[in-house]
Amino acid sequence: FFKFAGAFALFLAAGPLAAQSNQKWVTAWAGSAQGPYPFGNVSASMNLSAAFPDANKGAHDQSFRLIVKPDIWGRQARIRLSNVLGGQPVTFDSIYAGVQLTAAALLPGTNHQVTFGGKPGITIAPGQSAWSDPVSLPFVRNPSDFAGRKLAVRFHVAGESGDMTWHAKALTTSYLSEPNIGARSQDEGEAAFPISTTSWFFLDAVDMMAPADTQVVVALGDSITDGTASTLNGDDRWPDVLSRRLHAAGRNVSVVNAGIGGNQVVGPDEYSAAKPFAGGPAALQRLERDVLSLSGVATVIWLEGINDLSMNGNRTAADVQRGMREGVQRIRAKIPGVHVVGATLTPALESTNGAHGSAQQDRERKALNEFIRTSGLFDAVVDFDRVTTDPRTGGMRPEFIPDTTTGAAGDKLHPNRLGYLTMGMTVDLNTLLPKAKAGGK
């Protein structure tokens, strides 16, 4: 990692690199927008009253330092800021991106300004989002040297934001300034960001310029994709495990996570900033934003439906099947040649979560899994049910139950780190990508 440090000064003055004909934008990280804060399901929740004394008013003249882990790095990046679930225009300025050193501190010399339309700030209307201009990362001489390193995206909210578009379950620690502190995004140290959060705000995607044959794998799902019960800051959700396997096998890919805790395929029937739901908009409602608009998508792995079948969702397997057919049709229409992989639902029988665990839900789950395996709707199937179900009880395998985030007993619905590791290791890499482009080892 430190190979670039001595040569950094040679590149400091370099402007944005021209995109080469053998390169393209690919999404390297995503954090699906799910609601106006504080509606959502947070893991390792923190008291944010010092940052946001009035949740309805949101942020006020303060800075955010959000920590994300790009699945690949490049010498150019761009970010997408989102106000899609806000209720008023939000003005962002003093926007920077660089490499996290540790906690809220940055690796010296890596803090680069991000512009929008050539300007140092942007006002985004409610219901809208915006991609930044390309920002040069001249210190990234060899992208592979940065594997696993985290990007710090910093911005200042000028004035009052109102409802904040956020992703509740980041399972990654980010940092906030106190209100009325002003623009502190240029600071490389940590003193200006004393408040910790385990959620992401306003930022919902990061692209990197990468070789043209790079393929993006999107994991679309609910809390079991979002990583509930996995390790805080451990990057051990099942898509993380899959990513490490793909990179180790020499595949030129980027795996991004489009999971939202509590999400459903077809419900709720209505979702808006004025009528939020903790699980966010239905997968069918957010499909354009969280999958189809991302850059370089080649494969979508869809693991979802258990919340539709819960007491909160009150749907049947047939309802979810119809939703999946519609969703897959839309994905194929928008992305020619895309590879769509269906994943069977993991068990929830006798869950201690009040909305889950009934025998009726388990019957519907099994019916939906049979559809996923045999309908021919999907190009390939990942059988997560097979590796997570205890054949003696029909519920979650006992070693997968204890919660890895907090050390609690677990809820028999969400796998722990061992469960996610097993799931990520189950995916057949040879059936994951479009056959004509699979390549690699």
Image (cartoon, rainbow, N blue to C red):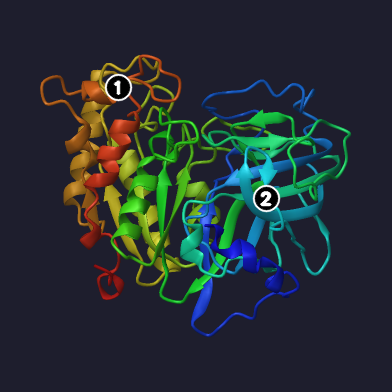
Q: Residue at x 30, y 39 (%)?
A: 421
Q: Is residue 91 above or below residue 251?
A: above
Q: What amino acid does circle 2 point to?
A: Val
**What residue sits right under mark 1 in the picture?**
401
Q: Is residue 345 above or below residue 195?
A: below
Q: Few, some or many C-alpha atoms within 10 Å of disc 2 (few <14, some 14-19, many ≥20)?
A: many
Q: CA distance from mark 2 to mark 1?
A: 34 Å
Helix, strand or loop status at disc 1: loop
**What residue sits right under mark 2 in the picture?**
153
Q: What amino acid does circle 1 point to?
A: Ile
Residue 400 in view (yes/no) = yes
* Image-based side of 221 in relation to 198, left or right: left
Choose the circle earlier in sequence order: 2 or 1. 2
Q: Nearer the viewer, mark 2 or mark 1?
A: 2
| Residue extending furthest toward the bottom | 21
Q: Residue at x 31, y 65 (%)?
A: 250
Residue 262 position in % (x across, y down): 46, 31
Q: Residue at x 47, y 51 (%)?
A: 148
Helix, strand or loop status at disc 2: strand
Residue 371: quarter of image: top left
